[in-house]
Image (spheres, rainbow, N blue to C red):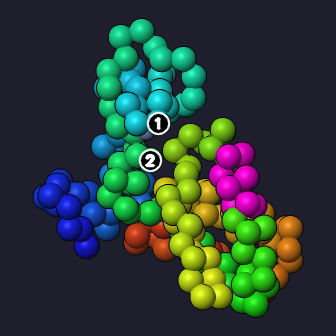
Amino acid sequence: MKTTPHRHISDVRHEQLYAPRHEDPYFDAGKPPQDARCPECGVVFHKGRWAWGPTPKDAVSVTCPACLRIHDQFPGGYVTLKGPFVQAHRDELKKLVVAREKHEKAEHPLERVMAIGERAGSLEIQTTGNHLARAIGNAVRAAYDGNLKVRYEADENLVRAVWTR
Ligand SMILES: [Zn+2]
């Protein structure tokens, strides 16, 4: 599942992903015991939660759960947009995805788009979190109608959204 030199560390997290869903190993791994700042994206951990804002005094440097997932290429959500409409409106749809990420990320800093993959006839979007995958699916459906199916996979703690038009 994982092929980087840090394989042993990541494998532990991956195995833990099959634990009950309230135990999110990425969240736990990224929950520091004190105020912190992620050196990669600048999100800060303060009063028990990750949020955008000024760096707290005495903040330590801790990579946030979203950046950990991005490193591991281990998404928390997948959105597939497919069908003839997608083929013809690729750029429009990509803009919508990026705009939705920006909107959601402002409120939910650990919800990020990891990748937008382009295939013949489809766009494959990977997100760091469940919430954003749903939000993108809903936004595309609200804007362009079509057919949306969202499935939550509890054993893997991830959301798969498939939109077709
Ligand atoms: Zn980060």
Foreground: disc 2 or disc 1:
1
Image x and y of residue 139, in percent? 78, 63
Figure quadrant of residue 157:
bottom left
| Left or right relative to 43: residue 133 | right
Image x and y of residue 59, in percent? 37, 17
Q: What's the residue type where badge 2 is placed?
A: Ala
- Residue that badge 1 annotates: 41
x 65%, y 88%: residue: 121
Q: Is mark 2 within 8 Å of ligand 1?
A: yes
Magenta segment main secondary structure: helix
| Left or right relative to 156: residue 132 | right
As drawn, the label of residue 8 is none
| Residues marked 2 and 1 touching at CB (< 8 Å) | yes
Please say whether residue 19 is one of the residues in the magenta stretch. Answer: no
x 40%, y 72%: residue: 155
Image x and y of residue 51, in percent? 55, 31
- Residue that badge 2 annotates: 66
Q: Is mark 1 within 8 Å of ligand 1?
A: yes
Magenta stretch in the rendered image? 95-103
Q: What's the residue type where badge 1 is placed?
A: Cys
Q: Tell me the quadrant of ligand 1.
A: top left
Return the disc, 2 or 1, that comes first in the chain's sequence.
Answer: 1
Give how far apart the Cα atoms at labels 2 and 1 are.
9 Å
Report the label total: 2
| Left or right relative to 67: residue 146 | right
